[in-house]
Amino acid sequence: MIISEQKSREEILKALEGKEKVFLVGCAACATVCKAGGEEEVFQLQEWLSEVRIEVTGSVIIDEACHLLRAARDLRHHRLAVDEAEVLLVLACGAGVQSISGSSDKRVIGGLNSLFLGNVRRFGQFEERCSLCGECILNETAGICPVTTCAKGLLNGPCGGMEEGRCEADREMDCAWQRIYERLKKQGRPGVFKKTVAPKDWSRHRRPGRHKLR
Ligand code: SF4
Ligand code: SF4
């Protein structure tokens, strides 16, 4: 899921400078799990906006704000309140904000910072394990991603800095390559240690954001 956090109230207030009427949009998917843009956060934001004398004309929590058709449909259902507002303040990831801005001619303000693609460890704890490189090598690395979890993103084994299984760049972290070695050993296969992984084709990397999956 996309891990996000709320922008500071100061930043939101600055973005709303001069505005008096706002429509709020939340997301029932990732932003809700991150406690950044679900029903509770939209309600808290609404309360705060009334304290700073900005009127909320209405609000909606979209099932998945990144879903273009759902976002457009839900905004249509709230057309009067949307029309009454000067801006739409969206508590969703960057993809969600762009669904909304593509569905309305109103100015759209994003209220969250999108941080990374994350795994959920437990409620409120997220870990980055994939950086969407576009050329997955997990089959050779026992399901552990060195692109993301090795501090140097090494593809063909560890650097010389690992000490007692810890990464030289951050002694709090396990060395990704030590973990790959141990897991492959348990699986009884050499995996990446008997192959050479070719340099990555960075043209397949997610930036500059041109990928469309159909
Ligand atoms: S190799 Fe690439 S696609 Fe596979 S988990 Fe790592 S970053 Fe993600
Ligand atoms: S110690 Fe391990 S995880 Fe850290 S940079 Fe070197 S190979 Fe990567």
Image (cartoon, rainbow, N blue to C red):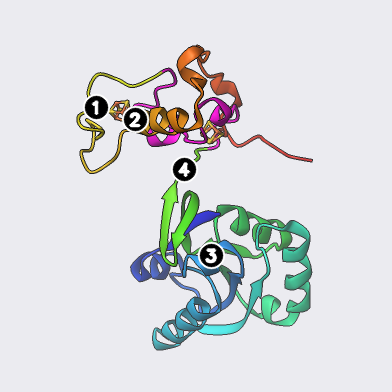
Hey, what amino acid is under mark 3?
A: Ala
Residue shown at 56% from the left, 29% from the top: 205
Q: Which residue is mark 1?
A: 162
Secondary element type, mark 4: loop
Hey, what amino acid is under mark 2?
A: Gln
**If the picture is divided into quarters, which one holds ligand 2?**
top left
Mark 4 vs 3, N-terminal side: 3
Instruction: Indicate the quadrant containing the N terminus: top left, top right, bottom left or bottom right.
Output: bottom right
Secondary element type, mark 3: helix
What segment carries the magenta color? 132-156
Label 1, label 3: how far apart the Cα atoms are = 36 Å
Hey, what amino acid is under mark 4?
A: Arg
Ligand 1 closer than 8 Å to label 4 CB? yes
Q: Dots 1 and 2: beta carbons under 8 Å?
A: yes
| Disc 4: CA contacts within 10 A as few (<14), some (14-19) or many (>=20) | some
Residue shown at 40% from the left, 27% from the top: 181
**Image disc number at residue 31:** 3
Ligand 2 closer than 8 Å to label 2 CB? yes
Visible in this render: residue 25?
yes
Mark 4 vs 1, N-terminal side: 4
Mark 3 vs 2, N-terminal side: 3
Label 4, label 1: how far apart the Cα atoms are = 20 Å
Q: Position of residue 45 (x, y in %)?
A: 46, 79
| Disc 3: CA contacts within 10 A as few (<14), some (14-19) or many (>=20) | many
Residue shown at 61% from the left, 70% from the top: 28
Residue shown at 54% from the left, 22% from the top: 202
